[in-house]
Amino acid sequence: MRIELVKRPQQSALYSALSPFIALALTLIAGAIMFSLLGKNPLDALYYYFVDPLREMWSLHELAIKAAPLILIAVGLSICFLSNNWNIGAEGQFIIGAITGSILPVMYPDLQSWIILPLMLIMGVIGGAAYGFIPALLKTRFNTNEILTSLMLVYVAQLFLDWLVRGPWRNPQGMNFPETRNFHQYAILPEIWPSMGRANWGFVFALVAALVAWFMLSRMLKGFEVKVLGQSPRAGRFGGFSASRMVIFAFLVSGGLAGLAGISEVSGAIGQLRPTISPGYGFAAIIVAFLGRLNPLGIIAAGLVLALSYLGGEAAQISIGVSDKVVRAFQGMLLFFVLGCDTLIHYRVRFVGSTAHKAEVSHGNA
Amino acid sequence: MGMLEAVLMTIATAATPLLIAAVGELVSERAGVLNLGVEGMMVMGAVTGFGVALTTGSPWLGIFAAIAVGALFSLLFAFLTLTLVTNQVATGLALTLLGLGLSGMLGESFVGLPGVKLTNIDIPFLSDIPLIGRLIFGQDPVFYLSILLTAGVAWFLFRSRVGLTLRSVGDNHGSAHALGINVILIRYLAVMFGGACAGLAGAYLSLVYTPQWVENMTAGRGWIALALVVFASWRPWRVLAGAYLFGAVTIGQLHAQALGIGVPSQLLSSLPYLATVVVLVLISRNRRMTMVNTPASLGRPFVPDR
């Protein structure tokens, strides 16, 4: 038996909407199999992963905290991927944004005023955008592969953060722990609704970013430019769009959003810099972007799903003793299924038995 | 064993995994398939090699298992990109993320356990030659295999008929298909060869370079291997030169850290990554050269229209 693809005359609207759900269903099935192989009751495990965290208000707030960076980063990545720019260094831009945003509260802790927090957020955006600008500049000036350079810069950013918190930025009153001083009250991103849970304004930033990006991509000329240059650079050139300026634009936007995610995470959820400030948000956001079908509104939903997998990982570790390492395996499987199911949008899949195929061939010869 | 000799030997052990993974990826890219999953296949090889060697006590079984797992794992990528015609960049990333996640899960119980080291070959008398003796005649078996692999791939690609067919598939899959070549089959085999090599390279890390299992122990080596293929303009012997250059940078910075030369260790640790960026810039700035060398169908989807 063989699998044969027949190109659809046009994209299937049905499968465009269904494919993320099919992918999720397949991931759950594969996950259930994985849990039974690990010797756990699969239904229990899936319950703790995907239902239990949704049952209480405080844990819904935790969900928003985890979803915020994922959505912010993924919205920027969707602009990159749609314009055929492969920024996979968002993790590094996240870290640099967190660092530049933390300059004021760490180096000038005596400056205490309401103006500090907005300045921190702006500096975080600038830092992330500047770090994203490097692979973009190298691509436009020297024709360098942006996938490899943006990824290499992730390792450099991680090591730079490690040096800062162990060296010059280490908390002088911190008993030699590798962390900066705690941010003062004016440097903390406020909670949205403190009586209900911990969720901070980072989640609002994420929703606003997604809405603005959705408006740009679907209603503005710039969004059209992004898509044309991504699908056919030649057509874009005829339209008078500049491919290299698009590279810079895409990387600046996604770097800036990753930087905003970084400083929001540090000033909101963590409150100081540490050697590790991200459980791989920059990479998980790639999965979010594809699960959301590169549509900013879809990305909001996808970000919540991936955030749920992080929370569920913690819940399952506590309640049934499944290692939190399972989460990343889960997320990797999900991206595989998402990409596989997207084939259904462009192609009709036919299973051809070998005998039927032979008949077809002989018919063709006759 | 003198100091210089020791340094040269460690350079070879740092270069060998890069060389093996990059040569495998080179074959896949020469057939027109860009597999960004090298890091994931490598880390799966590392965890498999370590686990099998630990439970059976035989590093060789570990190496064979890692090769098999690398090839099988790449089959996932091949099925998606070649049969379901998904985007190669995105699918490669998916393979890397899945590999890093799965290996962390599978290897959790191995963390902190002492590993099984593959012993070096010691050819009597010859390995006693001063300076170069141990370097050439006293290495681990996989080192020799990596040199043979490079020579074999160089011969296969540029001196054999099947190699020519493989390159034609990578340069123009439309024409190759019109000539009756089974493009998809050749690409499946090339991707699996790349996966097997990446698996071997990973096992080398966990059985020879540092005989232990640490999560994410590949530390970006799969990505450096991908960069090496570009650096080498898709030629096997240049991959060897590049791998040894990177081995030298890695070992050089480790020795500089040990000497404590007053530069932050983190800066020294980031040198291999920064060097990758610099090397990519230097090699890519000549657009015409890059155009000529890159397999023309690299990364392009192929659906046979009968």
Image (cartoon, coloured by chain):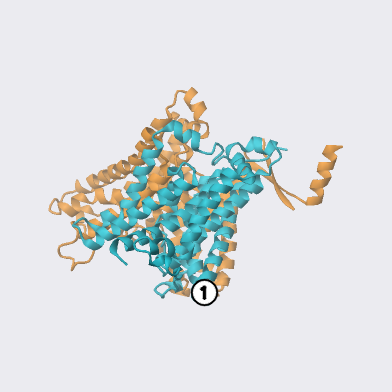
Q: Nearer the viewer, residue A29 or B147?
A: B147
Q: Nearer the viewer, residue B239 or B62?
A: B239
Position of residue B95 in the picture relative to residue A203 (left or right): right
Label 1 resides on the chain identified as B
Q: Give percent across and percent down for residue A233.
A: 49, 30
Q: Which residue is mark 1?
A: B58
For the image, the number of numbered tags is 1
Quarter of the figure that contains the C terminus of chain A: top right
Mark yes or no: residue A150 visible.
yes
Q: Residue at x 42, y 43 (%)?
A: B231
Mark yes or no: residue A331 visible.
no
Q: Give percent across and percent down for residue A210.
A: 42, 43
Position of residue B183 in the picture relative to residue B271 (left or right): right
Q: Amino acid at mark 1?
A: Ser
Q: Residue at x 85, y 40 (%)?
A: A363
Res B65 quadrant in image: bottom right
Q: Give percent across and percent down for residue A77.
A: 43, 44
Residue reaching furthest to the left: A110
Q: Give percent across and percent down for residue A120.
A: 24, 47
Q: Residue at x 39, y 49 (%)?
A: A151
Q: Nearer the viewer, residue A16 or A273?
A: A273
The chain in orange: A
Q: Residue at x 41, y 41 (%)?
A: A146
Vertical side of B131 occupied by B56: above or below? below
The chain in cyan: B
Numbered disc 1: secondary structure: loop
